[in-house]
Image (cartoon, rainbow, N blue to C red):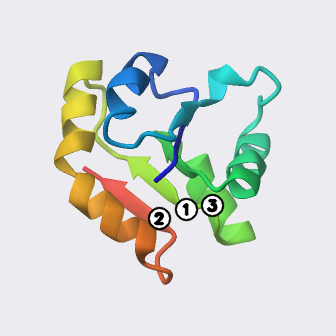
Amino acid sequence: MKLLLDENVSFRILNSLLSIFPESAHVSKDGSIKSDVEIFQYAKRNGFTILTFDEDFYDLQLIKGFPPKIIWLRVGNISNLNLLNKIISKKAEIEAFEINSEVGILEIY
């Protein structure tokens, strides 16, 4: 599974996520990706699932459909370590979401 971490998800958790989701990346790695629409299109072209706190991706998916799939983090303001632990604890749920062709968004609380 390839997660694309949105700019509002700290790049600092990427290295730890790579052991679980090895093909993941952060949008800051490619400086040309700036807007939500560009991130959405980049994820679609490159087979990523977007990991974000931003509800704008939900709105984009309502208009454009999926892929890409969206993992919408609804956990509020938490530390990077707690966020990383939350994602790790949802690994099985995230993997099941990825293979489900009928669902385009996963909300994590």
Callout 2 amino acid: Ile
Q: Position of residue 87 (x, y in %)?
A: 27, 42
- Disc 1 target residue: 69
Residue appearing at x 77%, y 31% in the figure: 33
Label pair 1/3, CB-CB below 8 angstroms: yes
Compared to residue 72, the image places residue 76 above or below, namely above
Compared to residue 35, the image places residue 3 above or below, namely below
- Disc 3 target residue: 68
Label pair 3/2, CB-CB below 8 angstroms: no
Judge by depth and name the residue closer to the eye, 82 or 29.
29
Mark 2 and mark 1 lie on one chain; the one further toward the N terminus is 1
CA gap, disc 1 and disc 3: 4 Å
Residue appearing at x 72%, y 69% in the figure: 63
Q: Position of residue 5 (x, y in %)?
A: 52, 35
Judge by depth and name the residue closer to the eye, 21 or 27.
21
Q: In the drawing, what numbered circle is on residue 105?
A: 2
Q: Is residue 79 visible to us here?
A: no
CA gap, disc 2 and disc 1: 6 Å
Q: Is residue 84 visible to us here?
A: yes
Q: Secondary structure at mark 3?
A: loop
Mark 3 and mark 2 lie on one chain; the one further toward the N terminus is 3
Q: Secondary structure at mark 1?
A: loop
Q: Going by the image, does 19 lie left or right of 65?
A: left
Q: Tell us which disc is closer to us: 2 or 1.
A: 1
Label pair 2/1, CB-CB below 8 angstroms: yes
Few, some or many residues within 10 Å of mark 3 (<14, 14–19, 20+): many
Q: Going by the image, does 79 lie left or right of 13?
A: left
Few, some or many residues within 10 Å of mark 1 (<14, 14–19, 20+): many
